[in-house]
Image (spheres, rainbow, N blue to C red):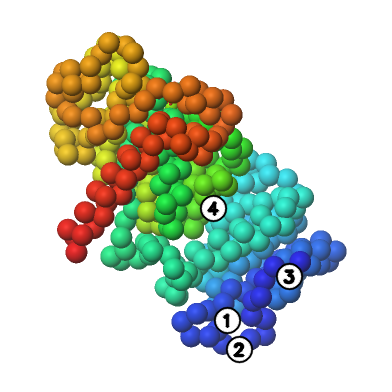
Amino acid sequence: MAAFDFNEFEETAAPQGAAQLAVAVVEPIPGVRLDLEERLGPGVSGFETIESVLPRLLGSPTVVVLGPSCSDADVLSSVERTLSSRPDVGVVLVADELSTTVLQLALRSGVKDVLTLQGDTLQIVEAIERVGSGLRADAGIAAMPGAPLATGGEGAELGRVTTVFSTKGGSGKSVIATNLAVVLAERSEAPVVLVDADLQFGDVAVMMKLAPTHTVVDAVSNIERLDTSLLESLLATHEPSGLRVLPAPLEPAFADQIGANDMVKIIELLQRFCAHVIIDTPAYFNDVVLGLVEVSDDVLLVAGMDIPNIKNVKIGLQTLRLLNTPMEKLRLILNRANSKVKLDIGGVERTLQVSAEALVPSDVVVPQSVNKGVPFVLSHPKSGVAKSIRSLADTLNEEDAEVRRRRG
Ligand SMILES: Nc1ncnc2c1ncn2[C@@H]1O[C@H](COP(=O)(O)OP(=O)(O)OP(=O)(O)O)[C@@H](O)[C@H]1O
Ligand SMILES: [Mg+2]
């Protein structure tokens, strides 16, 4: 498979301004090394040890692919020692199996992504390209052509952060967050990311039929060394829309390990390379939610059309006011707004003293799409409920454009 068309290591100088990516495979067992080299295609050089790669590095961005024999603590710590001061080099590990121990060990040693030898070669190629493009950005070499957002340099435009919140469980936060994020991802050239900050019971991955390898726990356990390229390598991809997803922990117990500062740091890094960061939340205030509300440009407050919902949202609004949350950030979203429930929208707006930004109708396609794991904006694009989400996305994009215009 001709995966790469990279410079040979023998090249003496990288072309100015458009350095190409070099790829080196490091694996002491010759048969395994050759197999990996062949899988990755021409232009890939093989080495027995990480030390032997060092003299061959020429300053152009290089991705080192460690073979399975490099998964132990000694080799990984020598990789860390050898490459920690080399912003032009990124490391990917191809392990025999993906255990939590190997993953943690590797990420702590500065490895940007871990894949399995048995896995699809395309996934390894994609990981190399991802890590390689991060190197170009970090090293200040030309960013990918056509990317509308810079990847975090001084003065780069930051992505818009939208938190979807409600003080009532089951009001529709997750379906609104996932469908809104999918619409924004389809419209945007730059990445759009959905973060599941319902750390105990998040179900975004299930709603999108994703089987994630990494979650927010992996980002937090590497928080000290977390940068945009490591964080990007931890995101899952929803293939039908291109939406990137940072899923909630797989076990509720992990939620305790995640603090508000960690989540805020993650969001601020995501903003550097994503046009939109959409955040799904649990149905209660905690320090994580408060931190997220603070860094958000928009807070979508979701209310269902029944009295307990409205009562809870009123209490939520009062709490946000007490916490000095700027009211301009808050947008009321009335869910199941067409239900024949004898609650009139004007009355609800008067009670809450906020006018509704979006009315999302009740529709049987919503639970159907949740059960199928396909967002309804994709499975039923013509439904009224999909239209309401698209017009909500229009509003956010218009707001964003307006803010950018005002900033000049
Ligand atoms: N507009 C709608 N029409 C029909 N059903 C809806 C609508 N909105 C939400 N639902 C249904 O309500 C259920 C709860 O929605 P969702 O999981 O998005 O709520 P949530 O606020 O995220 O809940 P939790 O607080 O438990 O996280 C979903 O399974 C969905 O099927
Ligand atoms: Mg939810």
> Which residue was labeled with disc 3?
2
Q: Is mark 2 within 8 Å of ligand 2?
A: no
Instruction: Assess disc 4: are there few (<14), some (14-19) or many (≥20) residues with their C-alpha within 10 Å of its C-alpha.
Output: some
Disc 2 to disc 3: CB gap under 8 Å: no
Amino acid on which the number 3 mark rests in the picture: Ala
Which comes sooner in the sequence, label 4 or label 2? Answer: 2
Amino acid on which the number 2 mark rests in the picture: Thr
Which comes sooner in the sequence, label 3 or label 4? Answer: 3
Q: Secondary structure at mark 2?
A: loop
Disc 1 to disc 2: CB gap under 8 Å: yes
**Which-is-in-front pick, marks 4 and 1?**
4
Which comes sooner in the sequence, label 2 or label 3? Answer: 3
How far apart, in angstroms, are the residues tagged by discs 2 and 3? 23 Å
Residue 313: where, in percent of width, then height? 25, 21
Residue 217: where, in percent of width, then height? 50, 39
- Residue at image position (16%, 35%) is 327
> Which residue was labeled with disc 4?
233
Q: Secondary structure at mark 4?
A: helix
Q: Secondary structure at mark 1?
A: loop
Q: Which disc, if any, is residue 12? A: 2
> Which residue was labeled with disc 1?
58
- Residue at image position (17%, 28%) is 354
Q: Quadrant of residue 373?
A: top right
